[in-house]
Amino acid sequence: MSVRGYQYRFISLKAAMARRYELKARARKQEETRQRIVEAVAALHEEVGPTNTSIKAIAERAGVQRLTVYRHFPDEPALIEACGAHFLSQNPPPDATPWGWIPDPEDRLRAGLADIYDFYQRTERMTSNILRDLPEVPALEAATQPFMDALRWYHAVLSEPWSAPETQEDLLYAAIFHAIWFDTWRSLVRHQGLPVETAIELMVRLVRSSATR
């Protein structure tokens, strides 16, 4: 190969490498912008709730133009889904697996409620706003599905060691679900000022009264 051929090949290789670097830098910048938008949505949802979160507010918080928000998230469901995934990655719900290793039903319920109530305490503002706005924002239904699935899992694990007469099965089901629901924790701990441990014992008594071992 001639000197000119080597020079041409070197210049072409250099241009290709520069092009790849440029594409990677652009993709990285786009991902950083997308992440800023998602974090802005999560912050606003936690502060004011989905209903009161506008595209203008999201753009201002993220430091981008409104069109940039639409370019990354063309519709509300996509935006809310990304926000929900981000928030849960930062605040993972409890893992119910270890509760299933506890044979005593009351001790299992205490352990489960302690983890669940700790999660509610850490995510109180966001959870409260999401549940409040759920009827007004249809896109929230799909975004909250992982949380609802987790509650069903918690209920199944915590119900397993309990038994009740056939006439009381519905009461047992309702008592355990009531115990693990966010509004129950908030009512007992926030509104009535009970210590978490006392609130848990109250729920254990409620479930006990609806079941037989």
Image: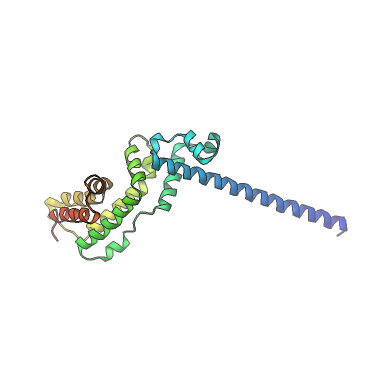
Number of numbered labels in the structure image? 0
* Quadrant of the rendering where the C terminus is positioned: bottom left
Residue that appears at 42% across and 48% down: 87
* Quadrant of the rendering where the N terminus is positioned: bottom right
Colour scheme in the image? rainbow
**Percent of width and height locating residue 158:** 24, 57
**Percent of width and height locating residue 89:** 43, 52
Residue that appears at 33% across and 53% down: 119
**Percent of width and height locating residue 132:** 32, 38
* Nearer to me, 100 or 192: 192
Q: Quick check: 189 left or right of 39? A: left
Residue that appears at 22% across and 66% down: 103
* Nearer to me, 19 or 156: 19
Relative vertical location of residue 134 with respect to residue 149 in this rendering, above or below: above
**Percent of width and height locating residue 178:** 22, 48
